[in-house]
Amino acid sequence: MTRRTHVALAAAIATTLTLGLGACSKTSHNDGNGPGPTQSANGLTSQTDIIGGTPVKGGTLHILSNQDLAFLDPARNWTEPEMDFGLRLLYRSLTTFEASPGPDGLKVVGDLATDTGEPSADDKTWTFKLKPGLKYEDGSPIVTQDIKYNVERSFDPDLSGGPDYAKRYLVAPADYKGPTKSGELGNDSIETPDAGTIVFHLNRPVAEFGQTVTLPTFVPVPKAKDTGTTYSNHPVASGPYKIDTYDRGKQLTLVRNTNWDAAGDSVRKAYPDKIVMDQTGSPEGIADRMISDQGDDQSAIMYADMSASKVADVVTNPAVKSRLVSENENCTTMLALDNSKAPFNDLNARMAVEYALDRDAFVTAVGGPQLSGVATTYLPPALTGGTAVDHFKIPGGGDTDKAKDYLAKANLSGGFSTTITVSMAQKTQAEAIQAALKRVNINVTINAIDAAQVNSTTGNKDKQTGMTITGWCPDYPSGSTFLPMIFDGRLITDTGNFGDKTRFNDPAVNAEIDRIENLTNIDEANKAWTALDSKIMDEMPAPLLTWQNKPLLVGSNVAGAFGSPIWSAQIDYATIGLKSAK
């Protein structure tokens, strides 16, 4: 949207957050014995406190994970919680969001840049100036040519998986494939007139480009240190921490980047001296350790969502519940169907799945109604004015009779067989889907694999199975970061297809996306996104599942913990630390 509507849109989203749909309505400090989660307007619980108060400097923060990080390369980092981890700890972008719960956390400020950018009158040219004295972990200066280089890297098909806004917005040749294969982009795309200035030329007005450059695409990467597809093993730090050791799939240790200057970074507090991520746990084992709260685990936090099987153990124990961070993710979880292959290239087969699903059972599988609610549209309520829209009005347990009617229309009265690919941690969720669809003779085989491999499998047209559990969260508070990212068929790729996982491609939808993105009236644009949501719903590329809270336990010695309204309710690593540096 154009510049004159952007501020109003942010204000509208902030209003819905204040209502409890995405974040806190107030901020207080909890010493670990406070009230814990409260009920929010959409029926989900919402954590209103900063757990543990203000951290002290020093100590070792432990992060307990059941998975390796898929991509720390900023050109490829487009999933949560990896984006939060990378952008808050290891590297910095041109702009970033304030580290605060609630609406305050939606405010964009300059990060490497002095401010949020200077647009031209038509919002098609954006200029950013770097703060003085910025350095990498080795002491070398950060220059705008390094930011340009990483933006160029994001076009390389060998570095797939990252945000594609540069490809969508920048003036660039249609066949451009990154600096290694195609050379540098010309000055008609990106200018770096000096080491401290960068100018982006866009192919259409983008009033919210100051928010777009919060993404890791706009992180500097020094060309001399680029290692291509292995850059994720040690991205060069521009943030407060650097990689000390990284034994992939086992342990990642971060230590202070002594060349990071806190005076030039108003957002990251960098409280711990060291951060150690243990990647060898299981969801259940991690939950048990966090509930027990012994030894180093008192100074630990969960990396990924708490196992659903452990939710009751937490919410029924007030002492443990007081250490639960539980924010609404503002994300929509859905069942992506491969629309490019039979049987899901038939709308009737897709609608059969939509009506056959038992969403109440799925809610139970992800932790129960305290942590989840049934999704009824693709756009989460925070992007539809704060009110959930129930498009089909399907009962929570599904409608098997109507599902069978759709199967008959698809000439599949006897049912069919398909496979669902999920992470190990999602197996219980997949079993709920399997049981529901079995009621109408849709037989689902579960392919449960390591979480770090899910995206590379489901994003590959040759490896993709009929179904996968997926979801989408707005990259920043705008409808333009939601529907286009997951349903614009022009973005589909054979591999690294991490957006439109359904491979849904409707030229009429693509054209409507273009029309809405050029609207200048906020009310008209908001109504248009909602109307487009309804149109896509009628084509049902991905049956809906839930809107969820993100349940994360922290240890009793952890301070500064809250679910970020911008990082999909992940704990904001910019302010996390310890009560005591023991």
Image (cartoon, helix red, strand yellow):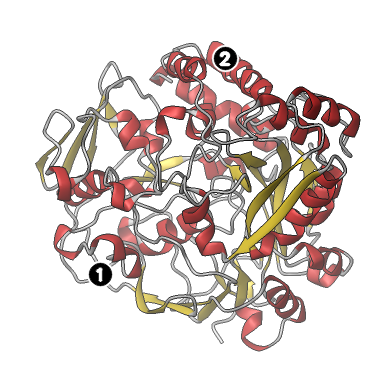
Quadrant where the N terminus sits is top left
Taking the spot 52% from the left edge, 30% from the top edge, the residue there is 487
**Label whose residue precedes the other's in the sequence (2 or 1):** 1
The foreground one among 383 and 423 is 423
Where residue 492 appears, x then y in whole percent? 43, 35
Which secondary structure lies at badge 1?
A: loop
In this rendering, the answer to whether 21 lies above or below 32 is above
The foreground one among 374 and 256 is 374
Residue at which label 2 appears? 528
Where residue 210 appears, x then y in whole percent? 36, 34
In this rendering, the answer to whether 74 lies above or below 231 is above
**Residue 332 visible:** no
- Distance from the alpha carbon under mark 2 to that under mark 1: 46 Å
Residue at which label 1 appears? 137
Where residue 361 appears, x then y in whole percent? 85, 49
Determine the image quadrant of residue 315: bottom right
Q: Amino acid at mark 2?
A: Ala
